[in-house]
Image: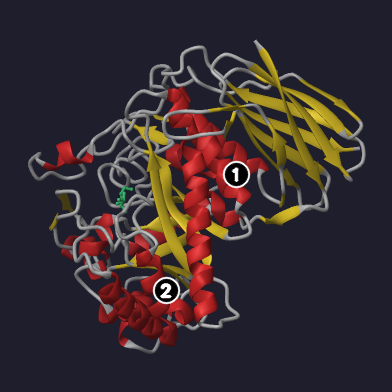
């Protein structure tokens, strides 16, 4: 079957310039993300620091501009001091968030060294669960102060003469969640967050701060939490966080693919709440969004893992992603791009082994999961000016969602305005979609390539033995004529159409 849809873009109708940090990711001390993920001394491909070269190569290929660290739920019980200084003196601790033993062999300075090596920027979270203002101000003195004070001189003693200059900080993690160590009410958290923000800014006035929004949009306190927290912190923070994990729990693909419409509404609701507080405060300042945890997460079950005995770096949250998950990740990326004017930071959670695009085997290989590809394409080709899409598409309904476009799409014009890239998903399970694109005020165009991720088995996965079972090809069918393009979107496909301005 074949259906038709239309996409209209105009060079002058802009959403915003992308902040490259929307292609960020997340690395938590959880399961095998750090240990045997990015760090494995003794691995054949480990460098002298113990960082896995094969994993670094994949991360460099993704061109990840920012990595959030060290948690996540982990940070709410973390003493950052345990992870600095001579390794032999670091304590082994019971890590309560994920019921693991944290050896602290890898800590703050190792993370910064690794981040520099892979060419990414660190985004650091402070512990506002078991700790507060004092630990946060000491931490930023250690990381950012040039020297001549106890904590900055301790950093120097540890071998790091220059400050780490960490400029983006999260004020805790998911503090609205009852599962969080040191869970707080919005009032309790709002007060602590603002006082911590003030102290941190006194140490380094150039930092940017992210205050915790809700853990997801279905939290009972959602929106009221944002309002209350921002009413305390508005003048002292720059971003509010959003988190969301999607999953095909009922094996209902039509519904699963529509879930990003809910994410779209979630983003709109957070923007509205920020702007409500702005209006109440008669403020000229705008709060931006940090979608600092997003992904598909449902194949593994965190609760089952929790009853296992205490162990070091147990295999937790190791979701094996299939082809349909890659479509959802593509749809999520399009949704983030649609809000590029307000979403300035976003982190695919996470990066290695734990709900991640990259998997590793201890002592063995590293390979790309299906979701690696849309993330890679967006990070590579999705930087520039996001153009406002007008889409005319046939729609479908599910029990949960009405009027879902079969076609989702967005266009990004490169900075030099020499290239335009279209990202498009066909949600239809039975119809090829012929997408007629009018790309106005960009001159005549020619096709560079049309990349397609498609698969006859929606549950297909990649493994170490068969790492290329799901991978893109660039044999997509696109006909370009002047400023028009006819793009064939195969049934259930992620498409990247790269066009050059002649
Ligand atoms: O990313 C896994 C976990 O999901 C994080 O630790 C937490 O912030 C969220 O609930």
Relative depth, front residue between 202 and 429? 429
| Number of residues whose C-alpha sits closer than 10 Å to that of mark 1, classed few (under 14), some (14–19) or many (20 or more) | many
Measured from the top left, where is residue 341 in percent x and y? 63, 59
Measured from the top left, where is residue 387 in percent x and y? 73, 48
Q: Quadrant of residue 65?
A: bottom right
Work out whether residue 46 can be spotted. no
Mark 1–mark 2 contact, CB under 8 Å?
A: no
Residue 420, above or below 231 = above
Quadrant location, the N terminus? top right
Relative depth, front residue between 246 and 319? 246
Relative depth, front residue between 33 and 91? 33
Answer with left or right where residue 264 lies relative to residue 449.
left
Q: Nearer the viewer, mark 1 or mark 2?
A: 2
Q: Which residue is mark 1?
A: 379
Question: What kind of colouring is applied to the model shown?
Answer: secondary structure
Q: Quadrant of residue 15?
A: bottom right
Q: Quadrant of residue 358?
A: top left
Measured from the top left, where is residue 11 in percent x and y? 82, 49
Answer with left or right where residue 487 lies relative to residue 58.
right
* Residue at 37% over, 72% down: 229
Q: Which residue is mark 2?
A: 230
Measured from the top left, where is residue 241 in percent x and y? 43, 61
Dot 1 or dot 2: first in sequence order is 2
Q: How far, Cα to Cα, is label 1 from label 2?
A: 31 Å
* Circle on res. 238: none
* Residue at 78% over, 42% down: 9
Quadrant location, the C terminus? top right
């Amino acid at each position: 079957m074949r259906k038709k849809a239309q996409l209209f873009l105009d060079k002058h109708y802009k959403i915003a310039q992308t902040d490259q940090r929307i292609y960020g990711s997340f690395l938590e001390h959880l399961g095998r993300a750090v240990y045997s993920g990015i760090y494995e001394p003794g691995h054949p491909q480990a460098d002298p620091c113990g960082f896995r070269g094969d994993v670094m190569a994949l991360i460099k290929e993704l061109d990840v501009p920012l990595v959030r660290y060290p948690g996540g739920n982990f940070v709410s019980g973390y003493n950052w001091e345990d992870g600095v200084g001579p390794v032999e003196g670091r304590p082994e601790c019971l890590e309560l968030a994920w019921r693991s033993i944290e050896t602290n062999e890898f800590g703050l300075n190792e993370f910064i060294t690794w981040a520099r090596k892979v060419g990414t920027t660190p985004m650091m979270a402070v512990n506002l669960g078991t700790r507060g203002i004092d630990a946060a101000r000491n931490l930023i003195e250690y990381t950012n102060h040039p020297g001549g004070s106890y904590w900055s001189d301790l950093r120097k003693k540890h071998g790091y003469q220059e400050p780490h200059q960490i400029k983006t900080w999260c004020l805790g993690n998911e503090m609205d969640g009852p599962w969080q160590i040191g869970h707080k009410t919005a009032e309790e958290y709002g007060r602590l967050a603002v006082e911590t923000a003030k102290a941190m800014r006194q140490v380094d006035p150039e930092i940017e701060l992210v205050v915790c929004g809700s853990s997801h949009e279905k939290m009972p306190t959602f929106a009221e939490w944002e309002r209350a927290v921002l009413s305390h912190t508005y003048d002292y923070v720059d971003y509010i966080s959003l988190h969301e994990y999607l999953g095909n729990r009922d094996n209902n693909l039509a519904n699963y693919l529509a879930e990003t419409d809910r994410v779209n509404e979630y983003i709109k609701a957070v923007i509205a709440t920020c702007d409500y507080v702005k209006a109440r405060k008669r403020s000229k300042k705008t709060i931006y969004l940090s979608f600092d945890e997003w992904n598909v997460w449902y194949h593994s079950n965190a609760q089952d893992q929790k009853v296992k005995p205490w162990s070091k770096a147990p295999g937790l949250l190791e979701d094996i992603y299939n082809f349909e998950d890659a479509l959802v990740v593509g749809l999520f990326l399009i949704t983030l791009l649609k809000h590029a004017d307000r979403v300035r930071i976003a982190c695919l959670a996470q990066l290695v082994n734990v709900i991640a695009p990259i998997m590793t085997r201890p002592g063995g290989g590293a390979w790309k999961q299906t979701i690696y590809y849309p993330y890679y394409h967006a990070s590579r080709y999705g930087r520039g000016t996001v153009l406002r899409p007008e889409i005319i598409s046939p729609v479908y309904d599910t029990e949960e969602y009405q009027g879902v476009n079969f076609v989702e799409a967005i266009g990004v014009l490169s900075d030099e305005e020499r290239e335009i890239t279209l990202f498009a998903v066909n949600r239809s399970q039975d119809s090829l979609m012929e997408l007629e694109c009018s790309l106005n005020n960009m001159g005549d165009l020619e096709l560079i390539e049309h990349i397609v991720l498609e698969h006859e088995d929606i549950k297909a996965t990649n493994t170490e033995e068969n790492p290329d079972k799901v991978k893109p090809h660039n044999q997509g069918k696109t006909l370009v004529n002047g400023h028009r393009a006819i793009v064939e979107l195969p049934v259930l496909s992620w498409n990247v159409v790269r066009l050059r301005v002649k």
